[in-house]
Amino acid sequence: MTNDLTLDPSDWDTFRASAHEMLDASLDQMMAARDGRVWNPLPDAQKEALTAPLPRKGSDINAQMQALLPHGVGNTHPRFFGWVHGSGTPSNVIADITAAAMNANLGGRDHGANYVEKQVVDWCRQIFDFPDDSSGLVVSGTSIATLIALKAARDRITDFESRKTGCPAKLVGYTSTQTHSCVARTFDILGIGSDALRKIPVNADFEIDCDVLLDEIENDRAAGNTPFVIIGTAGSVNIGAIDNLDRIADICESENLWFHVDGAFGATGMLSDHVRPKLTGLTRADSIAFDFHKWLHVNYDAGMIMMRSEDMHRRSFSERPDYLKGADRGLAAGNPWPTEYGPELSRGFRALKVWAQLATHGTDKLGALITQNCLQAQHLAHLIDSTDEFERLAPVPMQICCFRFAPSAAAPAQLDLLNDEIVMRLQETGIAAPSTTLLNGKNAIRVNITNHRTTFADLDLLVEAIQKIGHEILAEWT
Ligand SMILES: *Cc1c(COP(=O)(O)O)cnc(C)c1O
């Protein structure tokens, strides 16, 4: 016997019993997703326990992890309606355990995990009708996917000179005023600068105005700028609007621009018979950024970049120094490597939970759940429209319904504060968790339903709670 140090358990039976206990606690938590509060803030004592000094000695942490389990943001609860969060699945817990056990690094080399990612990329080709020689990479989310796509678009317009010499000053790109902030952030990170992102106004349906877009492109060319990309949105963050992607594809073709689509949640609508017809033109994109952790409920985090041209994708990112040299045999085989398609070298096995979600549940059911959420949003819109005290503030193209509580008893000047306060109390009482946004200068209660646990009855309950709380606040204010 030696005294060699290791991090493996000294007693596997004890470790196994403790692991099973933690798994049971995790599944109990998921089984009870409907019970109790939506948002369950972390108690002060637990916050305090997380300000401990750096531990010099190890200890058993199962109790502390179990105590943490109920204190998520609430997105596993059927009445979590805030922002755009997916609700996760119990089956993905098992995939995460498997991935952790393999401890795979998917930067490159020839090993089992990379073949799972290749399978996921191929499934995405089938979803978006992308060519066999297109490429893709599983990433943390749409923000990083956008960065990868727009870097390739930038490098293409400079014939890949920008990889060495940086960004020429006059590149400009276009998107709508409704676009997600990750697009401007990407312009910033890529050295193009967020001022070079032209935010085109939208029509009454919150879709980009393509006539103004064409004028802007012309103005920029006349001013000596170099347009290089249009970013269309398939599911805007505020209301779920889908730009006219076919028209944008036409414009990109005639103007020789890169056509990128932010489809963070909306692109997965390809799996839904209800949403797919609205996404015409998506399959013509040069690149699509989207998330698995939103409408496909893969447990955080997992997103994807799909790129029509594998060649441009690789030329924008490939960098193979001597110590990462490829080979036809041995561990250095399996080329090209995933690291040639994005900024990361070491990469975890996110692909496994994506593969597991699609393989376990199948795209028919995942698509039917997307349809169900859209029908639920329509049900909510109907409740709002048929109740005098409510005012709907936007159309409902997919799964988001924006409205405000506006009873005649409330003065117009009170409405913004009133609706903010309603949402605050819904969250704080743990009844439900919508968020808010500003639409045409009006403060809206924003209900986003990317949740496979939500029932129609949850929405009835939400509307009743808003009315009750709204009147309580008004009574306090008078
Ligand atoms: C959520 C979202 C993003 C950002 O995606 P992350 O996965 O959070 O990085 C971008 N665009 C839209 C439309 C979104 O809804």
Image: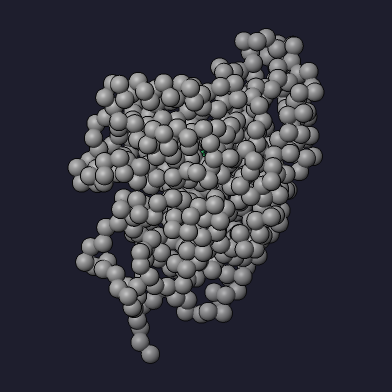
Q: Going by the image, does 384 lie left or right of 218?
A: right
Q: Residue shown at 50%/52% (left/top)?
A: 130
Give the quadrant of the N terminus: bottom left
- Residue 346, placed above or below residue 308: below
Residue 462 in the image, given as x and y percentages of width and height: 74, 33
Residue 83 in the image, given as x and y percentages of width and height: 57, 37
Q: Residue shown at 70%/12% (left/top)?
A: 410
Residue nearer the viewer, 309 or 418? 309
- Residue 362, placed above or below residue 450: below
Question: What coloring was used for the rendering?
Answer: one colour
Q: Residue shown at 47%/28% (left/top)?
A: 176
> Does residue 442 show up?
yes
Residue 115 in the image, given as x and y percentages of width and height: 47, 68
Q: Residue shown at 61%/59% (left/top)?
A: 358
Q: In which quarter of the image is residue 6?
A: bottom left
Residue nearer the viewer, 87 or 322? 322
Total number of numbered discs in the rendering: 0
- Residue 26, placed above or below residue 297: below
Q: Quadrant of residue 332?
A: bottom left
Residue 365 in the image, given as x and y percentages of width and height: 70, 54
Residue nearer the viewer, 163 or 436? 163
- Residue 229, placed above or below residue 349: above
> Does residue 38 show up?
no
In the displayed orientation, state which residue is furthest to the front.
Answer: 254
Give the quadrant of the C terminus: top right
In the displayed orientation, state which residue is furthest to the left.
Answer: 165
